[in-house]
Structure formats: structure tokens, C-alpha cells
Amino acid sequence: MDALGVPAGLRPVIQPLADAGTAEHEPDLRVLASEAAQTSHDFVELISPSNVSAEVLERFHFSLARIATDYVHAPLFPLFTELISVRDQLFVLLQGRQRPQQTRELFMLAGTACLLLAHASQNLGESTSAMAQIRTARMCAEQADHTGLRAWAAGTAALITEWSPQNRMALKLTEHAARLAPAGEARIRIAAIEARTAARIGDRRLSLAALDRMKQAREETPVHDEVEQFGGLLTFPTAKQDYYIGGALTLLGNYDEAHHHATAAITAYRSGPSEERSYGDEILAQMDLITIGLLRGDFDEAATALGHVLELPPQMRIRQLGNALNRLDSLTSRPELKGNRTIAQLMALIRDYRVIDSTAAIRSQR
């Protein structure tokens, strides 16, 4: 404080000039303007109750919605980098001061960013990193007291575990997620994950029961879910539902019904808006058609579906596709299929097929 009670940081930046009339002592007006602006900014920071505004929050909502929408149809790597940047900005803001409602919204946004990063990490084959992102998303959900984010995070944890060697643990996670999920796409999603997980581990009864719960959930009146409002990856539309049902029924051996749902998913993605066309779901549905074709002896259909798999650009070959190819390799080793020349020719086409990975391209095993 000076004699007038003005804090030192807010004293005037313009000081008296001894020789203001001489050119060599004239002040640099650009420097003065910059210093004056900084002082005004410092004053605003001093009196402002929050380090965020409605416009800033709206910008983050828009960014995450765009990334979630782009995620299903665009290459992964550029979006991954952008997601990290958005998350880091949100973390920095949370270390500052804002109104309680704004803090809640920031935690919800940060948790959503981590949720998307969990999916991205899984698609790179980094399940450990994906689960670390989920733990942070769940903590943010608790801080925000956001039931929708809790449910989506729990469901994504189950999804990540389903694709791992510890896939039996996914069933416990789906039980927890089902208790949290509000009526609507979140609840349908949990039942779909449970159905496919149970089918994957060979529990036919539980898988069929989960498919029944999924059908029931589709009949319920949905409630508002803030997470779904981001769109894209954070939704569970009919096409995705058909993809999951087809995957579960393929694992269960219900090939006719599985074929119907896998085809429905592919058709819906191809005929719908390009920004909603999930290349990951579509290509994994093609993998189901390959499996169905081989086991039903329809090698032409299997070859057609394989052609679509081979056409997928390398930067879009998510790690789950590598897992599916390895399961296909095990399938073709069955005694009734082993030695078949047509199958051998099909498998030769994917012998050097590579999928993206966090460290290097992964060669499918043969």
C-alpha cells in the first residue's frame, strides 16, 4: 500500500517524464498500452469470483462434442492429441477459483475428456492406460456428483475389461454400471456389453438374459443424460445396438439371427450421415460376417466381408480388430475347417495385415 492506500500491484503504470518534450525521451506507446492492459487484467483477476465464464464453458462443451462426433469416423491420432490438450486446459482451470456450479461443470467436462481418452487408449491396445483414464473420469464424476458420467465411466470400464484377458471381471463391472445407468441409451449400452461379455466367456443363459434386458431397456422412456448430449462416441444408436447384438449372437452360435443384426448395423452405418458412420463398429460387424460365412460354408460372403476389412486405411485399424483377427485364426484351425483350400487362401490375405498400436504396428498371428 502507498500513502493513498493503493496496492503496489495496482499503482499507475505511467510515471511523470522529466523531459517529455524531447524525442529521445518520448515513451514507447505500445509498451505503455501493454502495461496498462496488464494492470487492468490484474484488477479484473483481483475482483473476479471465477476464472471461467459461460463462454469458456460453452467452448469446452463444443470442443468435446466435436471430438466425440469426429471420433467415430476420423483417424484416431490427431483426435488423441487434441483430447489431451482439452483435458489439460480443464485441469488447469480446476486449480483456480470459480463458482460451485462452474466447478461442477468443469469436473464433468474433465471427466468426459478422460472418458474419451480411455476409449482412445483402448483402441491403441493400451488397456492399462485406458483404466487409469477411467479412474480419473470416475473421480471427476464423484466431484461433479454426476450420475450420467458415473454410469458411462462404469460401462466403459466393463467394455475395456471385456476385450482383455480378464474379461470375466467385466460382468461385475456391468452389474455396478447397471445400477447407475439412467433409462435410455446408457442402460441399453450396459445390457449390450453384458450380453456380449457373457457370450464371450460361454455363459449362454446370462447372455440371452442380458439381451432380453436390452430389449426391455429399448422400450423404456429415456431420461435426460448430459453425457449423451456430446453425441458421437458417447451415444448408443440403433446401428451400434445391432452391431452388439450381432456380435453376441455370433459368439453364441445363433448364426442366422446374428447375420441379420450384423447386416443391419452395416447397412445403417453406410446409409446414415457420414459423421455418424462408426468405422470401428462397421468393420467389426464385417468380422462377424466372416465368421458366420466360414461356419455356414458360405465362403463367398466371407471373402466379400474380408475385402471390406482389407480396404480399411491403416490409421483406422483399431487394436480390437487385431484381437478379432486372432480369434478368426483360431477358428480356421478347427478340425472341420483345417486344410480347406478356400479358407487357406482367405487367411493368406490377412497374414501381413497390420493394426494400429500404441508402440508399433501389430502383425496378426497366423
Image (spheres, helix red, strand yellow):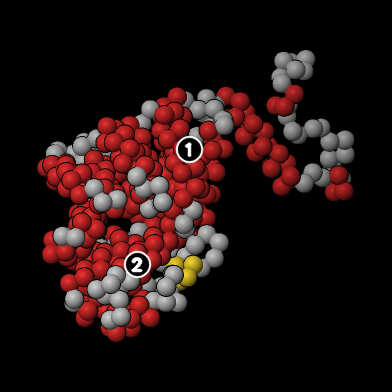
Residue at the (29%, 70%) spot, across then down: 334
Secondary structure under tag 2 reads helix
**Amino acid type, mark 1:** Thr
Q: Is residue 99 left or right of residue 245?
A: right
Marks 2,1: beta carbons within 8 A: no
Q: Position of residue 4 (x, y in %)?
A: 74, 15
Position of 331 relative to 132 (above/below): below
* Visible residue check, residue 129: yes
Residue at the (13%, 42%) spot, across then down: 216
**Relative to the observer, which residue lies in front, 141 or 329?**
329
Q: Which mark is residue 28?
A: none
Q: Which mark is residue 136?
A: 1
Cα separation between marks 2 and 1: 36 Å
Q: Is residue 136 left or right of residue 92?
A: left
Residue at the (43%, 61%) spot, across then down: 319
Secondary structure under tag 1 reads helix
Which residue is identified by label 2? Answer: 330
* Quarter assignment of residue 313: bottom left
**Relative to the observer, which residue lies in front, 36 or 346?**
346
Quadrant in which the N terminus is drawn: top right
Quadrant in which the C terminus is drawn: bottom left
